[in-house]
Image (tube, coloured by chain):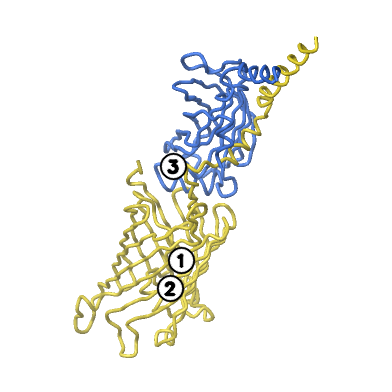
Amino acid sequence: MKYMLIFALSLLLLPPGRAQSKYSTRAGLITFFSSAPLEDIEARNTQVAAVLDLSTGQMAFTVPMKAFQFRRSLMQEHFNENYVESDKYPQATFTGRVLNFQPGLGQPAGPQAVQVEGDLTIHGVKRRITTTGTLEVKNNQLLVQSKFVVAPADYNIRIPALVRENIAKSVAVTVALTCGPVGPLQAVKSK
Amino acid sequence: MQPAIRLFAALLLAALLGHAAPAAAQTDLLKELETQRPDSLPPARDITLATFKGTHIINSQSVETPGQGTLLFLIQHRFGALNSGAYEFFGLDQAVLRLSFEYGLTDRLTVGVGRGSMEKTFDGFLKYRALRQSDGARAMPVSVTLLASSALTSLRFPAAERSFASRLAYTYQALVARKISPALSVQLMPTVIHRNFVDTRRAQNDVYALGGAFRQKLTKRVALTADYFYLLPGATADEFRNPIGLGFDIETGGHVFQLHFTNSQGMIEKFFIPETRGRVSNGDIFFGFNVVRAFTVKDRR
């Protein structure tokens, strides 16, 4: 009985914040921008789902492609129909980890620069990328920011010669997430 | 010693339990994302896009409308009949033309105006997307677009001048389409056409027809299209032919080119549904094209 008590007590002595190390969102923001001689193309997606585990530095993102909103409806149609083929490849994903990971990530006040490496899958093509970003825990929420460049050609997205003046060879992607904490208990509760 | 060992074992067990989770791989995080769908957020409604490439299939209109703030400029041509012989360069020496603008007031409502050279006809229409095919929550198997158009002929009549009302004809159409696969779309078009004035006593003022059309993509930017109308039995069906068209859609960025062969020279419902005379078996086939250019007049945000 005494040892049971010690066992129970030792559970309480586990590293603090274990239950709060995971953060997730379903309403993250990803925007992209490309500038070509004839026109600029810009789109935003506010339905990005992400989960980040600060205890391990690992993360996963899913991006529903049809949720990208363009300023011009024709661009949106062409994006989905001709380029990313959203019917065939409904979502882009990223799974990765923080390279310069150290315990207590995100705990110090202020944004913390991180290097992230992982697999980015767009249009059914998986590629290993590294990028930089910042993580910050503020008011019990994890703020995630990152910027990187994607080349459509790397993901087997072909741009016909006829519209090459309209579409840039590289696209700047901006990620901005505000994630709430997920405890193991909450994960069990959610149906 | 024994109590100390037990204490050590208990601590070790607790530590193992506590630290087992961080070993989980990234892929498990991804799986977690995909399986967890919180009840608080409604599941996304996935609207089917681009059932057809253009707002017209060949002769008929499609369920598509230009998005809000998009202006379409259409140039439609039908040359003369292929069987008119080498002297007429197989029809290319003659052409019937229609120019029109279509503007998306909202993503659902479109207004259009046009002018065709056949019988010097002005036309105007309203097109409303009533239902949109979608998956996910509130799934909808088909898209339905309603079309109401009127046509006004400005032709000078040789005999007694006719009243303004007698120059008008109206078309009401329900366009029901389903994108069966990313490549194949089909459309049904129950239609009624009302003409205020008809030439003979026997001719029908109201003509009923049922249309069908499909689009089969051949490549990402080229598609095979066809449309056809069946005239319901009556004086019109006895005297005229059912209009049929077969063609290709070719898309290049902001343009859509539609090249086709059809037995009808008229390009608005009022002409091609109740007044098609061409017999395909006789070679009364007209080569034609629709060219669509899209302009974004107003950005959505």
Q: Is residue A48 visible?
A: yes
Which quadrant does the C terminus of chain A fall into? top right
State which chain disc 2 sits on: B
What is the three-letter code of the residue carrying label 1?
Answer: Val
Residue ID for mark 3: A69
Q: Which chain is blue?
A: A
Tell me whether marks 2 and 1 sit on the same chain: yes
Label 3, label 1: how far apart the Cα atoms are: 26 Å
Q: Position of residue A179 (x, y in %)?
A: 49, 29
What residue is pinned by disc 2?
Answer: B190
The residue under label 1 is B176
Q: Is residue A22 left or right of residue A42?
A: right
Q: Residue at x 37, y 48 (%)?
A: B295
- Looking at the image, do the residues carrying marks 2 and 1 touch, with CB atoms under 8 Å apart? yes
Q: Chain B, which colour? A: yellow
Residue at 60% from the left image edge and 24% from the top image edge: A130
Q: Is residue A161 above or below residue B140?
A: above
Q: Chain of mark 3?
A: A
